[in-house]
Image (cartoon, rainbow, N blue to C red):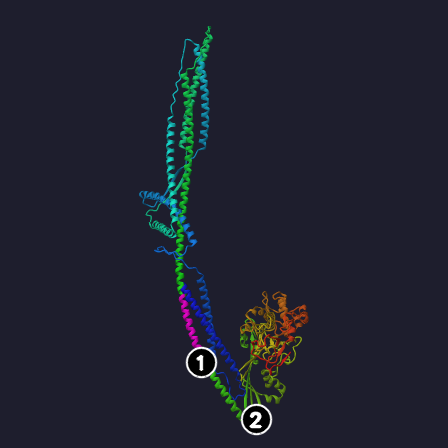
Amino acid sequence: MLEESKKLRIALEEEKDENVILMKDLTTLQLRYGELESIMPKVEIKEIINELYRVDPETEKELIRLRKELQELNRNRSEAEKEIITITSTLSTVRAQKPKVEYKEVTQEVIKQEKSPEVQRELQRLNNQVTRLQGNVNSTMELLICLRKERDELKEEKSKVETQLLTKDVIKYEDDPLLLKEADRLRRNLREEIHQRRTVEESLFDLQNIYITLERQKPEEKVIIETVERVQRDPKQIQEHEKLNRNMDEEVKARRKLELEVRQLRVLVQEKETMLAQMDDRQKKIQVEAELRQIKARILELETTAPPVEEKIIIEEVLKVERDPKLEKLTDGIRVDLETESNEISRLEREIRNLRIRLEILQKEKSTEKVVYREVVRVEKDPAVEAERELLREQVSKERNKRRDIEDNMQSFTLKINQLLSSKTVVSQEETILITNKDALQREKEDLQRQLKALEAQRQTITITFQQQSKLVTERNLMARQRSLKTNTEIQRLEQEILNEKDRIHQKDTLIIELQNSIQKEDQVETHTRETNMSTRVSIMDPETGKNLSPYDAYLQGLIGREQYIQLAELECDWEEITSTGPDGDTTILQDRQSGKQYSVKDALLSGRLTEYDVSRYREGKMPISEFALLVAGEPKFVPVPLLPPSSPLPRSPTKVPSSPLPLTSSSRLSSYGSLTNLTTTDHVSRSTQNLSSSTQNLAAGDEFFPISGIYDTTTDTRMSVRSALTRKILDVDTALKLLEAQAASGGIVDLTRKDKVSVHKAAQQGLIEQGQMYKLLNAQKAFTGVEDPVTKERLAVGQAAQKGYIPEENAKRYMEAQYLTGGLVDPAKAGRLSLEDALKSNLIDETMAKNLRDETCHTKDLQDPITREKITYKQAMDRCKRDTSTNLLLLPAASTDGNAPSYSSFKFASATRVMTS
């Protein structure tokens, strides 16, 4: 990448050097071309001997070819600049791109360039993830082993694809609240029965004592009753106790095993952590890559091994709430004890009843005896019996304590069993969570592999495109070099041709000097002829497209009628003035090239059709050749607008323009061009006025209807256009824009060189205005051509458009002031200009606007005098203007800061032509 970027930089520098060389060559060629153009017109032939000296067609062809080549060179330069811009943009993107790091799976050597903290953090995260994954993998491997066993068993059972519905009965022993309540009730009943038994035993003991006393009262009968109590253990309780002990031992063993496994795992974790801490980054990376390879290989094995039998197992968990067998046993035991106790109570009650019956019998028998023997019998307690009694009581209390201990142990065991069951459920939940995590990690791994493949494909495409671009760049560089070589050779050839052309010009100059010398030596009797051609063409401007159309094209497009077309075709002419000098004097003949007719000026003077005043005006250039030809030919002179002499001052108020006998349509305006071709200089002078009221203004136009057309520089004594004055900073931007808007609103942008009005689009093409001013000037041009109503699609005048809100009132007032001062307001529906009274009658303006236009104090002061820097109105600016005698156009005086400032106009006010009228 760096080498390619260096190559691109070198190529870019070469292109820049070549461009600089080309620009230098272009500037030299342009300077030489300018010198040639300045040298060529200096050749002035004052006297001509029946020959037409025109530009050599070969030189014209050569000039056309040179211009084409210059255009091609400019185009090539622009293309080269565009290529340079694209190359610089690609260079900037290439420089901005970070170096791509490619990871290869199989690497023999790992070259560590720098330890990045991000990589270290990533390694730590990967190590933690590896440990986590190892635990997950171990658990999943155990699950895999179990599932494989089940799969093998199912394979042995069935080889077909079967969908089995397995109902897995998960029996969870939960304490039945009813059983618990019943057990509590039975315990309470048992305690009450025990209490009743104790009370009954005490009462029995008392009754036995009474019975003994009564028996002793009988001397003849001695009944000794010995009660022997045998204490035996309950076999059911012993069995339950043994079972609970065994379960407890098993649980303790399992717990110890789990604790040992936990200790071993902790030791392994500590060893792994120490190993990871001791290992450096390289070993960690190698180990991680190895583990990743193992995992990938394992995953590939699992993916590649096609399962021969697809099994679909649906496991449904059916939760059945069953009674705990231990609780059942306990309740059964308690019930048995209760029954035994109740039986014993019933037995004791029977004995009590029997004893009471016997007591009653004895009392009855005693009552029958008359002799009462009163014997005092001292009953002494037998110590052996008492000791045995104490022993029995101690044994009973011990048994009770043992029983209570057993019950406590049973409760603790039940609690432990419940805890183990809950831990088992937690472990199963953790197992399911681990399985889901493993699946998610597997999916993430597959996504990462897919992304890696996509990135590799993208990298390949990028490399291919980069190679193609580099090839294209090299090819373009070669093409540019070839072009530069061609241009160099072409420039050398052009220089050689220019030198040859200079030699030819020099030869022609010498030949001209020789001819002039020979002419001076010739006899004065020889006649000389001078020809002046004047062709008049009538063109009609389409306001929508801005194109100039011939009368025939305008007639075909429906812009004018048939009669108008015939009249305009008659107005077109091609006049030629032939002046021959001889011993009899000057004889002037006018010839119409279209008809071939010739008219003598002397005959016109003798017949009275022409006067000496008209001839002098024509010689001085105050009368055009078309009007002079009409007088000589004897046709009536048709002047629609009264002409003022050029030296007359500008009228203070616009004159009313008579309506034209040749009415135009509302969407068309006429413009005429007159070109005067001299044999000596071959210059074409065209005179035209655009969008005036009469159709015959192609012959002569009233100069007073032109607005301020340009600027007169008092420092350099030159005239220039408004744009030239703006570029030289003689005028400010606002004043220049207002002057151009006044020109556009009064008929078009004025071309000083041709005394012609052109549309805004044409002015932009010809360079009379800037492209940025085009939008505002188009709005000003609508004041002359009309503003289209979006509802009725009619052409509205400026005042009507301002009343309806289509144009701002300030702009409309400014446009109407310019129209009023240059001849009258414009109605787009009619031809010609209108006075304020006619505009009021046709509802183009209202009374307030008419008053404002009549009152010069109400005119807006939005222009700045270039000399005094004061705010003036357009009327004041027109009063301060000077009139050019050659074109009779108004020029606003201005002064440049530097006397040697460059002039953008080739016109210079010489001493002979510097006649200005203010």
Above or below for 141 versus 205: below
Q: Which residues are magenta?
A: 470-499
Give how far across and how far down residue 747 sits, in percent: 59, 73
Above or below for 766 versus 462: below
Q: Quadrant location of residue 434? A: top left
Residue 493 among magenta residues: yes
Give how far across and how far down residue 803 sits, in percent: 63, 66
Q: Amino acid at mark 1?
A: Gln
Q: How dense is the environment of label 1, judged by Cα within 10 Å: few (below 14), some, or many (20 and up)?
A: few
* Residue 187 shown left or right of residue 851 in the figure: left
Residue 496 numbered tag:
1
Q: How dense is the environment of label 2, judged by Cα within 10 Å: few (below 14), some, or many (20 and up)?
A: few
Image quadrant in which the C terminus is located:
bottom right
| Residue at x 45%, y 31% (from the top left corner) | 180
Q: Earlier in the sequence, mark 1 or mark 2?
A: 1
Image quadrant in which the N terminus is located:
bottom left
Of residue 9 and residue 49, the one placed in the foreground of this image is 9
Residue 426 among magenta residues: no
For label 1, the SS is helix
Separation of disc 1 and disc 2 at Cα?
48 Å
In the picture as drawn, the residue positioned furthest to the front comes out as 278
Of residue 368 and residue 641, the one placed in the foreground of this image is 368
For label 2, the SS is loop
Residue 583 numbered tag:
2
Q: Is residue 27 visible?
A: yes
Above or below for 279 versus 236: below
Of residue 241 and residue 806, the one placed in the foreground of this image is 241
* Residue 577 shown left or right of residue 834 in the figure: left
Would you say the magenta stretch is mainly helix, strand or loop? helix
Give how far across and how far down residue 494 sits, in percent: 45, 79
Q: Amino acid at mark 2?
A: Pro
